[in-house]
Image: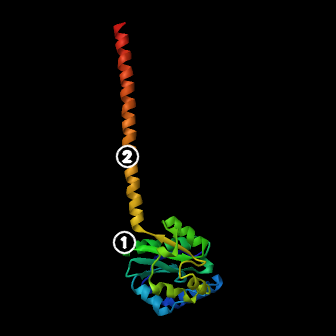
Amino acid sequence: MSEISVQIAGQQHIYLAEAICKEMEESAKVRGTGIAKRDPSYICKKMEEGKAIIAVTNDGRFAGFCYIETWGHGNYVSNSGLIVVPEFRKYGLATKIKKKAFELTRAKYPDAKLFGLTTSAAVMKINSELGYRAVTFGELTDDEDFWKGCQGCINYPILESKDKKMCFCTGMLYDPKEKEAEKWDFIKKSSLYERWKKLKTNKLFNWFQSKEEKSTTRITMI
């Protein structure tokens, strides 16, 4: 297997935009969704803005891709269009691309909620490892432009009939405020535990010291 580099895409990768769009379309056909078709100019724009992650081989071939989209005035962000060329699958490349995209998104939009819709068990697993949780569609963005993106999917009539509240996809969300609260809760609990452990240790030490002093006193008296 060729050596593969996973990096933030830039202008130097624009020549791969058509190949990326073609692979997105083919991948959607295989999944049977008919979604994720993108124009090369859109992909080029993402690269120029530094809002995409690309995997390329050491000889310049395209291996995988993912990009960032913002919704609801930047309050919600999604990592979209995750694809890996079939030739390069089963090497953990999707996980590397997704993690890199997650890191880039958190750096660019630290306060935004990250979310996504997926039917892929592999993507759900990766998202869970990154800290996402499964949610109802009601917890996702209400930005109509996002939901319009589902119109190319064969399951869109189902989504529409359910008033965009459910479909075959699973909604997943990473809320930085929740994570911060969890972190501080853990720190508080850890701090209390450490204080309790020290207190308990000191009490035991004092008890043993007291026993030793009493024993020494008895021996001296004898």
Tell me the kind of residue under disc 1. Answer: Asp
- Left/right of residue 75 with respect to residue 124 in the rendered view: left
> Residue placed at 36% from the left, 72% from the top?
111
Using the rendered view, name the quadrant where residue 26 is placed: bottom right
Other-residue count near label 2 (Cα within 10 Å), few / some / many at <14 / 14–19 / ≥20: few
Of 107 and 145, the residue lying toward us: 145
Mark 2 touching mark 1, by CB under 8 A?
no
Quadrant of the snapshot with the N terminus: bottom right
Tell me the CA gap for discs 2 and 1.
29 Å
Residue farthest along the top direction in this orientation: 222
Q: Secondary structure at mark 1?
A: loop
Q: Position of residue 212 (x, y in %)?
A: 38, 20
Residue occupied by mark 2: 192
Q: Is residue 145 visible?
A: yes
Image mark for residue 111: 1
Colour setting? rainbow
Number of numbered discs visible in the structure rendering: 2
Image mark for residue 50: none
- Left/right of residue 129 with respect to residue 185 in the rendered view: right
79 lies above or below 17: above
Tell me the kind of residue under disc 2. Answer: Leu
> Residue placed at 37% from the left, 11% from the top?
219
Quadrant of the snapshot with the C terminus: top left
Using the rendered view, name the quadrant where residue 153 is placed: bottom right
